[in-house]
């Protein structure tokens, strides 16, 4: 899932692989044309969660086709605080009728994820290796579709596919140059990655 990007490369990928790619939209970037594509909604907590902006964005989505899922607010690197936010925000997001993703942060285990979560979003602090070392625990005990955030290398993308992850995102894929070629290469391999 490229984040907030509908440049020509992304448009070409949507045209060639419409069932293999989707956008991860951020409440900071409302552009009506993005809703023509398959999409999910992030909460921008990695940078700074803004409650008003988040719910204003969800209100705007009512004019468009529904998202694949919406990421509930979280606290990067902290399961306990993320769980507390789930208790607060889940009822508010549920009113929109969209599937809701719970973000699994450092300290989370599959049995600690709220039963109501429609998706498991594997986050984790970028300062630790929690995500890469614990991902197998979630895929082995999978009861919901799994999305992994901030997958910015082809080796980790392929590892996610091997483990049975359903989707991934990364912010660096669409920058021109080597990474963009790697990203496009994932689609063009004989056995295509099916995570986007």
Image (cartoon, helix red, strand yellow):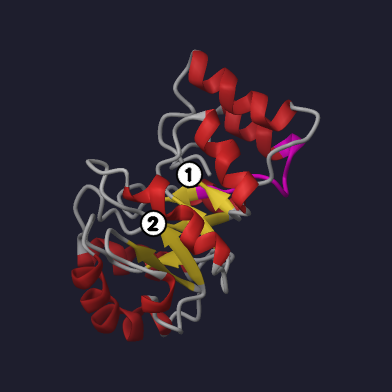
Name the residue nearer the viewer: 155 or 187: 155
Q: Residue at x 44, y 42 (%)?
A: 3
Q: Disc 2 marks which residue?
A: 42
Q: Is residue 9 left or right of residue 99?
A: right
Q: Earlier in the sequence, mark 2 or mark 1?
A: 2
Give the structural element (helix, strand or loop) at label 2: loop
x, y (%) of residue 27?
33, 55
Q: How many neighbours does mark 2 have within 10 angstroms: few (below 14), some (14-19), or many (20 or more)? A: many
Specify start and end residues of the magenta stretch as a single range: 15-23
* Image quadrant where residue 182 sits: top right
Image height of 179 relative to 76, above or below: above
Q: Outermost residue, top direction?
A: 177
Give the structural element (helix, strand or loop) at label 1: loop
Q: Disc 1 marks which residue?
A: 169
Image height of 86 relative to 15, above or below: below
x, y (%) of residue 36?
60, 51
Classified by dominant secondary structure, the portion drawn in magenta counts as loop
Image height of 36 relative to 101, above or below: above
Q: Is-magenta flag for residue 148?
A: no
Callout 2 touching callout 1 (CB < 8 Å): yes
Which circle marks residue 116 in the picture?
none
Can residue 30 be seen? no
Q: Residue at x 24, y 82 (%)?
A: 88
Image height of 96 relative to 177, above or below: below
Name the residue nearer the viewer: 99 or 38: 99
Quadrant for the C terminus in the image: top right
Q: Residue at x 48, y 37 (%)?
A: 5
């Amino acid at each position: 899932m490229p984040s907030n990007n509908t440049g020509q490369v992304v448009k070409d990928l949507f045209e060639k692989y419409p069932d293999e790619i989707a956008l991860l939209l951020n409440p900071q970037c409302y552009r009506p044309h993005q809703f023509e594509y398959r999409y999910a909604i992030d909460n921008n907590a990695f940078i700074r969660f803004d409650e008003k902006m988040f719910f204003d964005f969800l209100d705007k989505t009512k004019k468009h086709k529904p998202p694949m899922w919406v990421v509930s607010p979280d606290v990067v690197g902290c399961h306990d605080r993320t769980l507390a936010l789930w208790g607060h925000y889940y009822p508010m997001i549920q009113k929109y009728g969209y599937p809701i993703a719970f973000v699994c942060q450092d300290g989370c285990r599959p049995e600690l994820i709220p039963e109501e979560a429609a998706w498991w979003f594997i986050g984790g602090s970028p300062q630790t290796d929690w995500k890469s070392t614990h991902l197998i625990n979630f895929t082995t005990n999978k009861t919901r579709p799994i999305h992994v955030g901030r997958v910015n290398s082809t080796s980790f993308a392929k590892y996610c596919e091997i483990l049975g992850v359903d989707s991934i995102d990364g912010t660096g894929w669409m920058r021109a140059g080597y990474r963009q070629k790697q990203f496009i290469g994932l689609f063009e391999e004989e056995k295509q990655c099916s995570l986007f």
